[in-house]
Image: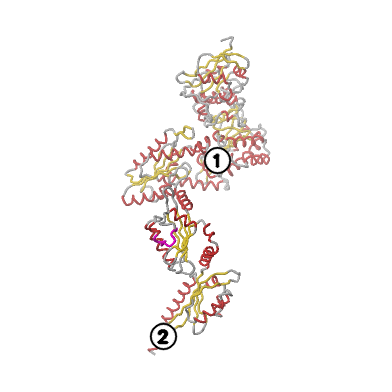
Amino acid sequence: MIETRDRDKDDRPVGHRAELGLLHFEQLANNLPESFWLIDIATKQVVFVNEAYERLWGGRMEDLRRDRFSWLSCVHPDDRPRLRRVIAENRFGGVNETLRALHPDGSVRWLQLRSFAMADDHGRIHSVGGIALDITQVVAQRDELSASIAINRSILDALPAHIALLDQDGCILAVNAGWRQFAEENDYPDDTAGVGLNYLSLCASSGVATAESSAHIEAGLRAVLDGRQSEYSTVYPCHGNTTERWFRLLATPLHNPGRGAVVMHINVTESVKAERQLAQAAHYDALTGLPNRLLVKDRIEQALAAANRQHTKVAVLVIDLDRFKLVNDTFGHGVGDALLVAAADRIATALRESDTVGRMGADEFAIVIPDLESSEDAAMAAQRIMDALARPIHAEGQELYAQASVGIALFPEDGSEAQTLIRNADTAMYRAKEVGRNNLQFYTASLNARAQGQLQMVIDLRRALERDEFCLHYQPKVSCVSGEIVGFEALLRWQHPTLGLVPPDRFIPLLEDTGGIIPVGAWVLRQACDQAVAWHRLGVGTPSVAVNLSVRQLQQSDLVALIRDELARSGLDPAALELEITESMLMHNVEDSIATLDALKQLGVRISVDDFGTGYSSLSYLKRFPLDSVKVDRSFVQDIVADPGDVSITRAVITLAHNLKLRVVAEGVETEAQLALLASNGCDEIQGYYFSRPIPVAETEAMLLAGRCLPANLLHAHGTHLPAAEALPSLAVPAAPMSTPTTGGLQGLLSRTVLDVTQEVLNFFPWPMLGVDENGLVIAINPQAGNWLGNAALLGEAARDCLPEPLLGILALRDSRPRRVIIAHHAHHVFCRPLGTAEQPRGWLLIALPEERS
């Protein structure tokens, strides 16, 4: 009993270990690429076969378990007799044969079959194992090379590779034409192209490879020659005196292992160079050559690792060029790219060699400053960069001025990881833009909270439309002639469930940035059209409704169709819908804007330019747009009573607009004095808090039914204005040399051309008079000059495009002496007088005296 218990106790762990070992064995065997099986001698049954059997042999494992010889049915008929004989002669292992396995689909795989005996601790054989290795690819390569060499040597000579046959010791037996040329180029010791020499020795002595790579090549080739390796491949440099070359060395056994090898040298220079270019592209910006975002992040991580060891600070700066998009839109991407390259160079020269400057994308750069002692050092570096960018940059014939907004994040205060520092510096940069651009801002925790608040607002905005949180308020526009309400501007409002009424300047830019302005803009259009129809049904006139369009909306391919459909759906008279577009929007893709506005105009709607005078549109472009009215920006109206300059600019805008047959609307009118001055100078309509703030729709209906109007004593009869001396006080402006503009800003144009001699004064003189500003634009012309030149509509045109050559010549000379010219068969003596002082002229006045009067 004791012996039995001891035996039972011993049997259980042994059985458990056996089961566990068998499980491990099966898992290992089923993950081998070779086919493997075991045959028990006592039962003559297959006790194990792994899953690779079916893939290599094409037979089924179940068949092999039933019949241990079923694998023979998978052997190619031509190989089957040989295999039967070999198996019979080696019943207990020792088979080592190459055979072909014929798969059911007709495909053939070459296999290397080996069998071996398995014995117990006493040497008694209990099983026979078998392994089959797939050598199809090796056989195919061997056969292809052998057949090519044996059948047609010319094929080898034509291959774009250097090919040599080696014996088992590494001596060269034969070479192709490519190898012979290679030998000549590398000064092999004789004219045999190395035949008979040891290839391994040649590699070490010819300078083809370095000592390190030569040792690597020798070891790889020796493994192939000894049959320990079926293939060896490596890429090595083989540079000439003036060229760089790389070759791939590929060695494979010749026939059976131990019989030699085939060596091929393939020129892979283009591939290596392409890989290097890809590596360059992966880490460097193609335009500026600076490190890209990926490499900048790596440099930050390196700087942080060093700072942790040395207990120093690291600064990460994110720099964004201010108003870069305007450069692209105005001058084209060629000039924009040239500006970026120049800016990158300026930034780099302002930094230390140990600092890193990279381009993050578009007009954004990043700076990594390691070994920083204090935050003041980062601020000083940022200021050096801004000073460097402030100097004029000449790009593609244009003189440009670059300004930058800079955000700074510091390690360890603002983050301990590269991505965190980049994100925080970026947040600080956007804060620099918000507070006026062209300044630097350090990151603070409050900025992060603000950025998170902005993100939450973006999320809330995406649900605001479906939650019906938007509404429209309407601000009336009033005629300066009749005093009556002639229309309303629809203004979007957002009633946030927790924040209350959100100011438009907080959420509308987010709508534009995220693209949400498209569905919201469509909603505004629908609501405004329906409301205009409702006003008309009140029977109190036909007030129009104005809807603002964003840049994204103007670029919509289906904008015209959308507005056409809304007009048809609502039944609104197209003339009662006014579309307001900012002046700067017009200059985005001018030709596309003109085409879109022309299509809208054909619908019958009215088109107005909002914020007029603040953008950079030229008069030559402005005349091409199918406009109905312009809205004088509130920045001019605000101080119109106290600032003579604003009076002059506003009066000039009104005059220019009327000459272009456009109505003028002044927005931001808040006082009676502002209204009086605007009305007396010919403004057509006003809009602002003086008459009414933006109000909910219910109040608009009450206002219309009450017939509310402007005070009669403040109105003007259309066409009667104040005398010029009262309406246009003189305005001093800086002098500038005369040039012909291409895309001059209207703001700059007006501020430079408000002259002491005005249009009204010129009308009193009986002689032709014409004023040209320092930019070469016609800013004043009296009727006599219009009759003389045969064209009275020259105001705002470029002088070079509309004036006769004799007058252009006089302008170019800027000579005050009279010069005789004949135009339209009429002789005049023309004087050219400076506007302002001769030292600092603000333009030139041409005075033409008839010959009999001069």
Viewer-side residue, 72 vs 42: 72
Asked if residue 41 can be seen in this view, the reply is yes
Residue positioned 58% across, 48% down in the render: 466
Q: Nearer the viewer, mark 2 or mark 1?
A: 2
Q: Secondary structure at mark 1?
A: strand
Q: Is residue 39 above or below residue 350?
A: below
Q: Secondary structure at mark 2?
A: helix
As drawn, the residue found furthest toward the bottom would be: 1
Please rate how many residues cluster around mark 1, counting C-alpha atoms within 10 Å: few if below 14, some from 14 to 19, many from 20.
Answer: some
Viewer-side residue, 628 vs 380: 380
Q: Position of residue 444 (x, y in %)?
A: 39, 44
| Quarter in which the C terminus is drawn | top right
Residue positioned 46% across, 74% down in the render: 25
Q: Is residue 821 above or below residue 165?
A: above
Please rate how many residues cluster around mark 2, counting C-alpha atoms within 10 Å: few if below 14, some from 14 to 19, many from 20.
Answer: few
**Magenta-span inclusion, residue 196:** yes
Read off the magenta span. Answer: 192-201
Asked if residue 443 can be seen in this view, the reply is no
Q: Position of residue 838 (x, y in %)?
A: 46, 18
As drawn, the residue found furthest toward the top would be: 852
Tally the marks: 2
| Quarter in which the N terminus is drawn | bottom left
The amino acid on which the numbered mark 1 sits, given as a three-letter code, is Arg
What numbered label is drawn on residue 8?
Answer: 2
The tag earlier along the polypeptide, 2 or 1, is 2
Which residue does the numbered mark 1 point to in the structure image?
493
- The answer to whether the residue labelled 2 contacts the one labelled 1, judged by CB atoms less than 8 Å apart, is no
